[in-house]
Amino acid sequence: ETNYDALLVETRGAVGLITLNRPKALNALNARVIEELALAFEAFEADDAVGAVVVTGSERAFAAGADIKEMADKTYAEAFLEDFTPTWRRLLACRKPSIAAVAGYALGGGCELAMMCDMIFAADTAKFGQPEITLGIVPGFGGTQRLARAVGKAKAMDLILTGRMMDAAEAERSGLVARVLPPERLLDEALEAAEKIAGFSRLAALSAKEAVDVAFEGSLSEGVRLERRLFQALFATEDQKEGMAAFVDKRKPAFRNR
Ligand code: CO8
């Protein structure tokens, strides 16, 4: 059993739920939070009963960025030696689909954390931005890369160079956000979507995530080739036989992840 200081970690049905819990700092991401996020993702990855993960914050803030108070006095040498990349890699290594449920501020590292999840659901109160430039730095958790891929060069340059925030409607229009919801529906809808994903064959869900991820990381031909191999491989599973038989029989499939 891990004791979390800065997170609430629980399971709801087949969904692993992580709630950032540093309300006094608007959920700013310090070294402790980032380590705990990696631990929580690893725990859910290892838990067969969990099929998908939801990450959320508070009504006021998903996360207002990396912890500025922790960073303020760092030297170049300290910043260089304290590289969070290996810790984020542990989170990113999770093969189970994840949803960031964002209300309020998702700024800097908070926006970057949301983008590390597989999709973002936003309350209409959400505000996204990469304000690092206003602090004399640039994004450091992948924001320049993931935002550019998510919203294209024009919006990414605009946000990263001016440091301005964009609201949920603009974020949805830009392709950063999958769904915009009233705040009171945000968590339930994220949990429902995650539960739905967890109810499908895990073989199919993990394959789908892996294939879409390659669209962001590799070439088109490499991605299409991987997708075809995954598609073909799923015909070796009982879940494919069950899923298609159930459709033909007009009944609900009973997936067994084999
Ligand atoms: N870090 C530390 N503390 C924070 C942060 C933060 N990022 N954001 C807010 N807080 C604290 C405030 O200091 C304040 O604490 P206190 O009550 O002790 O003064 C408390 O949270 C509440 O915040 P505010 O009083 O400022 O609340 P407002 O409603 O007035 O404003 C804002 C909300 C607009 C979100 C404002 O807090 C803000 O601008 N925050 C900073 C946003 C920002 O610049 N984020 C980017 C940080 S840099 C980053 O994320 C880089 C990522 C890569 C780093 C790589 C490596 C180390």
Image (cartoon, rainbow, N blue to C red):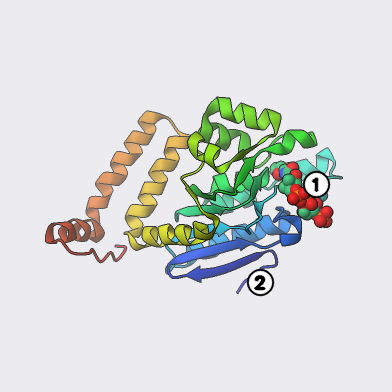
Q: Quadrant of the C terminus?
A: bottom left
Label 1 to label 2, Cα distance in Å? Answer: 25 Å
On residue 71, the disc is: 1
- Please tell me which residue lies in front, 237 or 255: 255
> Which residue is painted at 69% across and 56% down in the image?
27
Q: Amino acid at mark 1?
A: Met
> Which residue is painted at 42% across and 69% down in the image?
49
Q: Position of residue 168 (x, y in %)?
A: 55, 43
Which type of secondary structure does the marked residue at label 2 adopt? loop
> Is residue 210 something that shows in the picture?
yes
Q: Amino acid at mark 2?
A: Asn
Q: Position of residue 6 (x, y in %)?
A: 69, 64
Which type of secondary structure does the marked residue at label 1 adopt? helix
> Is residue 137 something that shows in the picture?
no
Q: Specify few, some or many for label 1: CA neighbours under 10 Å numbering under 14, 14-19, or 20 or more.
A: few
Which is nearer the N-term, disc 1 or disc 2?
A: 2
- Please tell me which residue lies in front, 21 or 124: 124
Rendered view: 183 above or below 108 = below
112 displayed left or right of 81 = left
Residue located beneath label 2 in the image: 3
